Image (spheres, helix red, strand yellow):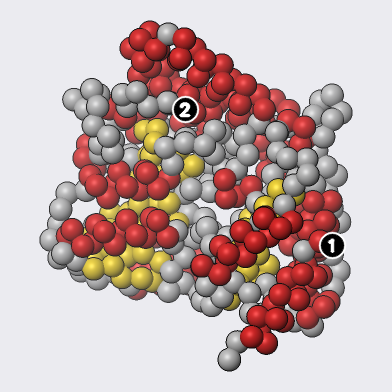
Amino acid sequence: MTTLTAPAELTLPNGSSAASGWSLSATGLHVNHGSFGAVPVATQVLQNTLRARMDADPVAWFSTLPERVGAVRREIAGFVGSDPDTTALVPNASAGASVVYSSLPVTRDREIVVTDHGYGAVTMGAERLARRWGGTVRTAHVPLGATPQEAHDAVMDECTSRTRLIVIDHITSATARLLPVREISASARERGIVTLVDGAHVPGLYADPLRDLDCDFWVGNLHKFACGPRGTAVLVAPGELSDELYPLIDSWGAPLGFPERFDSQGTLDLTSYLAAPKSFEFIETNWGWDTARIYMSRLADYAESVIATAFSEETGEDHHVDVGSSVNALRLVRLPSGLAKSHAEADALRDLVVAQFGIEAAFTSFEGVGYYRLSTHVYNTASDFDSFVERLVPLLIEWGRAAQSARP
């Protein structure tokens, strides 16, 4: 199999490596930006400065904090491409989904439709909501390689006259694929079904993710590909149901309308919100977001090719994966048989690899098959994934054979 040519690595204007703009361990191998992200040093410095200011004069800080949060919310909305008047800041995408679940009016004996690609915490929240409603959750099976039309049909075919809510991933976490959220939301709107789109991985990866998307709620993390501090995400609610949304913590902003009531959160440390635009600026100033996205996509092409080829040369099997609708900086490579056959096994493999080898990598499972989910950012280079091949691929093949032999 022929591997692709690696893109030339990005550098800072002073000629140093892009990675020098981050504080990631020089002895580790970070090829899993998609899980927890990585915050540029410049943003860390700003957030630490803000924290020092907060602790030096807390009364002045917290008495004026809602106004500053409101101002930065408008700036963040501009980056995401949403209307600031329909955009609230929340700690993470799961918190945004929890806000929706806790705020929707109770409708007895109704159904919620999710997919088998859904993020576990968000799906569990949907199950709790269904129990409160006295209803049920229906799970749409979307084949991994389904086309956008097939994925749309699989979701809508699961809906009935009792369906009240569809929860759908914009980019799936476990399977690294896009789902047709625009088409599904449009079909749901025609049938009077509410839609919640989980866009946890989307901000930063796509320039205008909300364009032509007519959903009721959309949540997205800023700590992943947008590189903001952890604890920063958006909840976008453009429709009438936004009036029902309240923060998970009641505070003095409760009498205000949406989204202003989310700007007041008592004594929570909201420096992550205030510092987030620094990360957007850092990427834009040094490379430009368009260049960054192209680089991440080309590097993902290379990494997917070189890793899948390395596995295939040893196992004689095809480790490339058709996900139907691929993501520019997230890809799947099938692991050797026997590895990561469940979510728990995938997490255990991740923990073993980071503990023993200092390699931060994501392993996932779907329908009993294990995958390596690679992700790229501007600080990654082709040599990172060449190192993954050299250091880890032989071990994964060995572990897979051992696991196969141990199974009854």
Between 395 and 190, which is closer to the camera in this rendering?
395
How far across and how far down the image is residue 156, in percent?
35, 68
Q: Quadrant of the N terminus?
A: bottom right
Q: SS of the residue at dot 1?
A: helix
Residue 273 - label = 2
Q: Residues within 10 Å of mark 1 (few under 14, many from 20)?
A: few
Q: SS of the residue at dot 2?
A: helix
Q: Earlier in the sequence, mark 1 or mark 2?
A: 2
Between 319 and 214, which is closer to the camera in this rendering?
319
How far across and how far down the image is residue 277, in percent?
55, 26
**Marks 1/2: CA–CA distance:** 39 Å
Between 161 and 354, which is closer to the camera in this rendering?
354
The residue to which callout 1 is attached is 390
The three-letter amino acid code for the residue at tag 1 is: Glu
- Vertical side of 205 occupied by 6: above or below: below
Of tags 1 and 2, the one toward the viewer is 1
- Vertical side of 124 occupied by 399: above or below: below
